[in-house]
Image: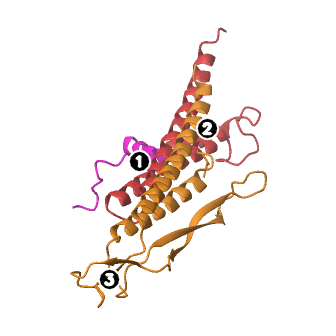
Amino acid sequence: MSAGMRPAALPMSPQDMIAKIIPGDELEKLSSSVLQSGAAMPPSLSPVSGAAAGTGFDGFLGHMVSEVSAKQADAGAAMREVMSGGAMPLHQAMIAVEEASVSFQLMVEVRNRLLESYQELMRMQV
Amino acid sequence: MINILPGIESTSAALQAERVRMAVASQNIAHANTTRGIDGKPYQRQSVVFESVMAKTEASFNGVSPQKVQVSRIEKDTSGPRMIYNPSHPDADNAGMVAMPNINIHQEMADMIVSSRAYEANLAVVRNARSMALQTLNIGKR
């Protein structure tokens, strides 16, 4: 088995998905340009005036995505250990999978609300 | 880490403890007729003792940290063996009596039922915790 091969049964984490769609250096450029555009805004308009970069809402969102990703990685590792006959008991693996699924749904819900409010704003009459 | 399923840590520990109890009950049933254990004597019935420990978590109910259950020890039942008359048995003594393990299969079956019901109850906790979380997420749906 080649080292780079990923077992087909394992779900891909959101970060992996993003990394697959956008290559690493591109992602770096993109996020730095986003940060710069935020810094270029006048202080009254910037979303998190005075707060350091990464602690605002974007930082919170990023933290949430990485948390969900970590939970999914945990669930994948637990399931792999169960399947390979490791010491991991079945119920713990199932609970890990369940936690990953519920927290993923929480993330999707937050995303839906954000998108909804954005569309609400776009529909606004001027 | 976000705590998405409430009280899942003690439930998980309880499931683990019940698994151990089930394993010990099945071992007792498997050895119901073992006249020669690893020490050469008839197998002795084993039973599980549970204890509660403090959970290592930052989550707490009003400052009281949750307690988990775990198996503290597995004890041997030291009551004497069951003597049955079977002169043809290789382990029979001069009088033709064979020392059988001190296991009552009915008691083991009852223990197994208790253990499996307790496991079921803990699984119901997991199910309910999950459905509570999902119902809370449904606040956002319209």
Tag 3 secondary structure:
strand
Quadrant showing the C terminus of chain A:
top right
Instruction: Say which residue label 3 marks.
Output: B97
Q: Chain of mark 1?
A: A
Q: Which label lies toward us, 2 or 3? A: 3
Report x, y in % for residue B110. Answer: 46, 56
Tag 2 secondary structure:
helix
Chain A is which colour? Answer: red
**Residue A32 appears in the picture as rendered:** no
Q: Residue furthest front?
A: B95
Quadrant showing the N terminus of chain A:
bottom left
C-alpha span from label 2 to label 3: 92 Å
Q: What's under tag 1, amino acid-wise?
A: Asp
Tell me if residue A42 comes above or below residue B95 in the rendering: above
Report x, y in % for residue B118. Answer: 52, 52
Tag 1 secondary structure:
helix
Magenta region: which residues?
A1-28
Q: What's under tag 3, amino acid-wise?
A: Met
Residue A16 numbered mark, or none: 1
Instruction: Say which residue label 2 marks.
Output: A37
Q: What's under tag 2, amino acid-wise?
A: Ser
Q: Do the residues indicated by labels 1 and 3 lie within the same chain of the protein? A: no
Q: Quadrant of residue B84?
A: bottom left
